Image (spheres, rainbow, N blue to C red):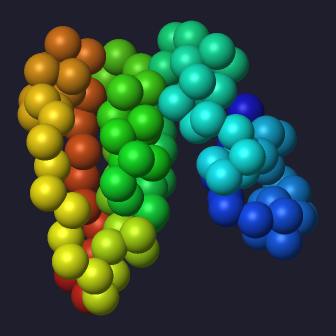
């Protein structure tokens, strides 16, 4: 099952054209709730490029041995970085044997 997230109807149409089975508009649906309800065993592989709350929801919903690939964080580009005041994520990664990896194109 392939799902994609977006922030507008125009982007939802593009995701549909690209073959997504489930499209979640995180401005009209609660991403964390949808992932927990529809993917109760977690998600094996996530490509994340938004950051902030979307990143947090992805971490919260990784499967055991799941992988999160960070390809950007558009929500913070050219802005003051958000100060994080929540617990650190290492316990979520450790107990699931999950991993986070950055992908920065110039390094490949």
**Left or right for 28, reference 54:** right
Q: Position of residue 67 (x, y in %)?
A: 35, 38
Q: Nearer the viewer, residue 70 or 81?
A: 81
Q: Quadrant of the N terminus?
A: top right
Residue name at image x 49 percent, y 20 percent: 42
Q: Nearer the viewer, residue 29 or 21?
A: 29
**Left or right for 29, reference 52:** right
Corner quadrant of residue 100: top left
Q: Nearer the viewer, residue 4 or 19?
A: 4
Residue name at image x 41 percent, y 21 percent: 63
Residue name at image x 65 percent, y 27 percent: 34
Q: Position of residue 78 (x, y in %)?
A: 29, 88
Q: Where is 78 relative to 64, above or below?
A: below
**Left or right for 92, reference 52:** left
Residue name at image x 58 percent, y 24 percent: 33
Q: Is residue 75 visible?
A: yes
């Amino acid at each position: 099952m392939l799902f994609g997230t977006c922030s507008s109807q125009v982007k939802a149409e593009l995701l549909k054209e690209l073959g997504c089975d489930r499209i979640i508009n995180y401005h009209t649906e609660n991403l964390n709730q949808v992932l927990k309800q529809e993917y109760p065993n977690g998600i094996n592989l996530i490509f994340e490029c938004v950051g902030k709350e979307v990143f947090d929801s992805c971490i919260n919903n990784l499967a055991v041995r799941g992988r999160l690939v960070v390809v950007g964080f558009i929500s913070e580009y050219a802005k003051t970085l958000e100060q994080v005041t929540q617990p650190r994520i290492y316990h979520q990664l450790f107990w699931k044997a999950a991993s986070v990896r950055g992908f920065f194109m110039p390094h490949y």
